[in-house]
Image (spheres, grey):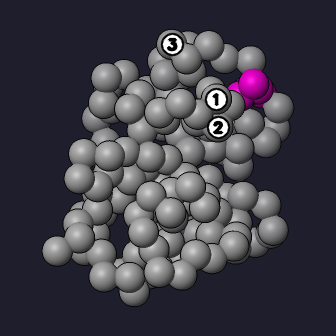
């Protein structure tokens, strides 16, 4: 059985499409709320791997879209502290499978999961063509 822990924003249409794709490829999902998880720096940091800090952020979060937060201006430690206070800023989904962790649902994550059919735009928001983290 291929089991994935999938951290989502409950009600997100993009996350719903991603979960459907995973289930269609034989995965069993353990779904958790990214907003309600009791994150600590040590539990959150591994999901970001070697990604640049700006790629850790949900670019569709209201504070980012309104220019109140610039994801490109953070050092790793500061970004983690902010995300612990405001988890809506965390790029989603967060995925854990067999001890491996990743964020987002781009082609790298799809390849890591060995999906039979990769789909363009799996991070795109239903309401626009923009990535919907």
| One can see residue 23 in this view | yes
- Gap in Å between the C-alphas at discs 1 and 3? 13 Å
> The magenta stretch spans which residues?
68-72
Tell me the residue that label 3 is attached to: 77
Q: Main secondary structure of the magenta part?
A: loop
Mark 1 / mark 3, whichever is N-terminal: 1
Determine the residue positioned at 42% across, 69% down: 114
Q: Residue at x 49, y 47 (%)?
A: 103
Residue 12, compared with residue 79, is above or below; it is below
Which residue is at the front of the view, 51 or 78? Answer: 51
Instruction: Name the residue that disc number 1 marks.
Output: 52
Quarter of the picture containing the N terminus is bottom left
Q: Which corner quadrant of the image does residue 30 belong to?
A: bottom left
Q: Is residue 124 above or below residue 90?
A: below
Q: Is residue 32 left or right of residue 107?
A: left
Q: Tag 1, which secondary structure?
A: loop
> Which residue has dot 2 on it?
55
**What numbered label is drawn on residue 2?**
none
- Which percent across, then down, holds residue 50? 53, 30
Q: CA distance from mark 2 to mark 3?
A: 14 Å
Q: Secondary structure at mark 2?
A: helix
* Placement of 106 over or under 87, stated as above or below: below
């Amino acid at each position: 059985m291929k089991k994935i822990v999938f951290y989502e924003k409950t009600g997100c249409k993009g996350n719903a499409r991603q979960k459907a794709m995973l289930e269609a490829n034989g995965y069993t999902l353990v779904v958790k709320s990214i907003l309600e998880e009791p994150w600590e720096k040590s539990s959150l940091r591994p999901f970001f791997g070697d990604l640049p800090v700006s790629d850790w952020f949900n670019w569709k979060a209201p504070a980012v879209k309104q220019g109140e937060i610039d994801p490109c201006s953070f050092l790793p430690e500061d970004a983690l502290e902010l995300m612990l206070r405001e988890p809506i800023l965390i790029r989603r989904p967060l995925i854990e499978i067999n001890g491996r962790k990743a964020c987002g649902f781009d082609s790298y994550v799809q390849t890591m999961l060995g999906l039979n059919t990769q789909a363009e735009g799996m991070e795109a928001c239903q309401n626009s063509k923009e990535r919907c983290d």
